[in-house]
């Protein structure tokens, strides 16, 4: 692992500013569109490099930090798949050149420690196309949920690859923030409320 970068910027102009210091793979929220009775939260993935010194590459598997592994980006806590009150997740879609993977823990870029609620769904977009060594906008990513309650700032981590110099082929990690569907109420809040209610009932029984 060559370096860990922090880039909490989500617009393309901001990406260009950020990439003056380093390359980046980030997610840009582009808005919400209705899909029947549901709502699609839409994204571009933005890859920035400096004079072809970084690249995106496909690998056989996702193995964060490992030379030759697939590059990727994970968006954390994007929705609640349930079961239980507040469940809102329907699906996630990847744009051309990527595949999608869902999980509640990780997948984290190496040397990052993102905030990750294990009750909520994370979406990982894995790069599957030919090597890319130029600034590129990848459109067509979405997260479909049942509600349109605005957005919350959550974290992302991503990995791309050093393409030149003494550390060629090593992996570079990013961590930052991205807008994702807001969950109302969040499952952790529901669980806390349920625990408080049980504690209150137990206290009443003991007093009797």
Image (cartoon, rainbow, N blue to C red):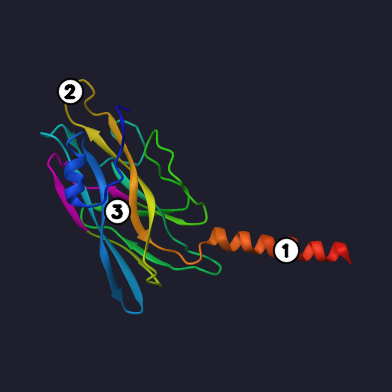
Q: Which residues are magenta?
A: 125-139
Residue 104 makes an appearance in the image: yes
Q: CA distance from mark 1 to mark 2?
A: 60 Å
Q: Which residue is mark 3?
A: 99
Q: CA distance from mark 3 to mark 2?
A: 29 Å
Expressed as whole percent of the image width and height from the top left, the position of residue 35 reads 30, 75
Residue 39 against residue 55 in the figure, above or below:
below
Is residue 135 toward the left or the right of residue 120 in the image?
A: left
Expressed as whole percent of the image width and height from the top left, the position of residue 86 reads 51, 68
Q: CA distance from mark 1 to mark 3?
A: 43 Å
Is residue 169 toward the left or the right of residue 110 in the image?
A: left
The residue lying toward the viewer, choosing from 158 and 72, is 158
Expressed as whole percent of the image width and height from the top left, the position of residue 74 reads 35, 48
The quarter of the image holding the C terminus is bottom right
Q: Is residue 132 magenta?
A: yes
Return the disc, 1 or 2, that comes first in the chain's sequence: 2
Which callout, 1 or 3, points to the residue nearer the camera? 1
Return the disc, 3 or 2, that comes first in the chain's sequence: 3
Q: Which residue is mark 1?
A: 198
Question: Judging from the image, what secondary structure is the residue with disc 2 in?
Answer: loop
For residue 124, the mark is: none
Which callout, 3 or 2, points to the residue nearer the camera? 2
Question: Judging from the image, what secondary structure is the residue with disc 1 in?
Answer: helix
Number of marks drawn: 3
Residue 63 against residue 76 in the figure, above or below:
above
Expressed as whole percent of the image width and height from the top left, the position of residue 18 reads 21, 40
Q: Label 2 neighbourhood size at 10 Å, few (<14), some (14-19), many (20+)?
A: few
Q: Label 3 neighbourhood size at 10 Å, few (<14), some (14-19), many (20+)?
A: some
> Please, which residue is most extreme toward the bottom here?
37
Q: Which residue is mark 2?
A: 165
């Amino acid at each position: 692992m060559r370096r860990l970068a922090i880039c909490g910027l989500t617009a393309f102009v901001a990406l260009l500013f950020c990439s003056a210091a380093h390359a980046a793979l980030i997610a840009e929220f582009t808005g919400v569109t209705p899909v029947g009775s549901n709502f699609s939260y839409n994204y571009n993935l933005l890859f920035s490099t400096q004079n072809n010194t970084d690249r995106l590459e496909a690998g056989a598997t996702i193995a964060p930090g490992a030379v030759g592994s697939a590059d990727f980006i994970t968006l954390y806590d994007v929705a609640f798949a349930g079961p239980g009150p507040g469940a809102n997740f329907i699906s996630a879609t990847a744009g051309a050149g990527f595949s999608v993977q869902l999980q509640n823990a990780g997948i984290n870029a190496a040397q990052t420690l993102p905030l990750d609620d294990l009750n909520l769904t994370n979406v990982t977009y894995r790069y599957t196309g030919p090597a890319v060594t130029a600034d590129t906008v990848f459109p067509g990513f979405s997260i479909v949920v049942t509600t349109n309650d605005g957005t919350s700032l959550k974290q992302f981590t991503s990995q791309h690859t050093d393409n030149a110099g003494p550390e060629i082929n090593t992996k570079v990690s990013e961590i930052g923030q991205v807008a994702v569907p807001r969950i109302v109420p969040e499952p952790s809040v529901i669980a806390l409320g349920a625990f408080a209610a049980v504690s209150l009932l137990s206290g009443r029984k003991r007093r009797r």
